[in-house]
């Protein structure tokens, strides 16, 4: 199983200035990629690394906030090429799909192979990857789900945005790798995780590797490597900070590499003259 980061921003000051990218991440392998939380710019980030959107197996939104969903309609259109190439699945919470203000347009949903509504107890396969809801998070009144991805006997937990709760420690137990949306350096009166929350989660779950991501301004300006060291020293778990275009390979051996940008300016066209 592999994870490719198309961004690591969190919070308005970093997302809407693109001080870090906000494309979410891919999880799976070469035969089955799932694009999770495609925020602003996600589609172009995919083109930059040379992934054909029509090759994606599916999309998952942990919640409807803009930094997790802004490019979902563009990606559905690109995956299905407006209906010429139908297929792909979408899993999202009910409030992202229904109500007065759904973030997924209705007109092109029929081009997808399947749409699943996330809720506690949800579990569904996308190709070789099993997607499960770990638990519902408390996050500013928006329906938000932490997730688990399983393939190749490897379990990746995605601790998305939310307030720290003791029940997280049980919900993510047994994960080999944990991605933690660590927005704040210090604890604040907002329903987001901070560095000490990441320490608490990793200390209890004890995965092989912790990956912190979704950084707000406090962490970006303090330093991502410094933040990762802070969490690693206190949790006793190896911690790496997510950065744009890094690929993490899991399984028998752990490997980290920075992907080469195939189309650095985000344009895939090649003429005969180059
Ligand atoms: Zn967020
Ligand atoms: Zn959010």
Image (cartoon, rainbow, N blue to C red):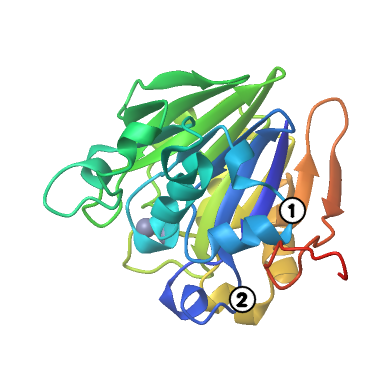
Classify mark 2 as within 8 Å of ligand 1 or not, answering yes or no: no
> Residue beneath label 2, please?
220
User: Alpha-carbon distance for marks 1 and 2?
Assistant: 27 Å
Residue at x 29%, y 47% (from the top left corner): 138
Residue ID at (61%, 76%): 220
Asked which quadrant contains residue 11, the reply is bottom left
Q: In which quadrant is the N terminus drawn?
A: top right
Where 74 sits versus 167, above or below?
below
Relative placement, left or right, of 178 versus 143 is right
Q: Please state which of residues 32 and 2 is positioned toward the viewer in this rendering.
A: 32
Q: Let me know if residue 160 appears in the view.
A: no
Q: Are marks 1 and 2 in contact (CB under 8 Å)?
A: no
SS class of the residue under badge 1? loop
Q: Residue at horizontal 80%, vertical 65%?
A: 271
* Foreground residue among 185 and 161: 161
Q: Is residue 14 left or right of residue 109?
A: right
Q: Position of residue 249 (x, y in %)?
A: 80, 38
Which residue is at a point 71% across and 61% down the rendered structure image?
268
Q: Earlier in the sequence, mark 1 or mark 2?
A: 1
61 or 253, which is in the foreground?
61
Q: Give the structural element (helix, strand or loop) at label 2.
A: helix
Q: Nearer the viewer, residue 80 or 235?
A: 80
- Residue 52: x and y, percent? 66, 46
Q: Position of residue 185 (x, y in %)?
A: 54, 70
| Disc 1: which residue | 50
Q: Is mark 1 within 8 Å of ligand 1?
A: no
Q: Quadrant of residue 121?
A: top left
């Amino acid at each position: 199983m592999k994870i490719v980061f198309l961004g690591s921003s969190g919070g308005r000051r970093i997302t809407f200035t693109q001080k870090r990218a906000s494309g979410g991440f891919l999880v799976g392998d070469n035969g089955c990629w799932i694009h999770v939380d495609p925020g602003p710019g996600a589609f172009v980030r995919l083109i930059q690394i040379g992934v054909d959107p029509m090759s994606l197996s599916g999309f998952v939104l942990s919640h409807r906030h803009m930094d997790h969903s802004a490019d979902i309609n563009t990606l559905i259109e690109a995956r299905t090429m407006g209906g010429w190439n139908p297929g792909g699945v979408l899993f999202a919470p009910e409030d992202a799909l229904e109500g007065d203000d759904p973030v997924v347009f209705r007109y092109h949903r029929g081009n997808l192979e399947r749409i699943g509504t996330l809720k506690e107890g949800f579990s569904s396969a996308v190709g070789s990857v099993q997607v499960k809801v770990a638990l519902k998070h408390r996050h500013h009144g928006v329906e938000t789900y932490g997730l688990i991805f399983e393939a190749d006997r490897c379990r990746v937990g995605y601790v998305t945005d939310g307030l720290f709760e003791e029940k997280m420690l049980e919900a993510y137990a047994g994960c080999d790798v944990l991605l933690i949306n660590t927005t704040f350096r210090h604890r604040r009166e907002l329903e987001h995780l901070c560095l000490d929350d990441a320490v608490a989660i990793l200390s209890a779950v004890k995965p092989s590797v912790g990956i912190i991501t979704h950084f707000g301004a406090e962490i970006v300006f303090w330093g991502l490597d410094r933040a990762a060291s802070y969490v690693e020293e206190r949790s006793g778990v190896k911690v790496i900070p997510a950065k744009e275009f890094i690929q993490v390979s899991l399984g028998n051996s752990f490997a980290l590499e920075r992907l080469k940008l195939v189309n650095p300016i985000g344009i895939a066209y090649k003429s005969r003259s180059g």
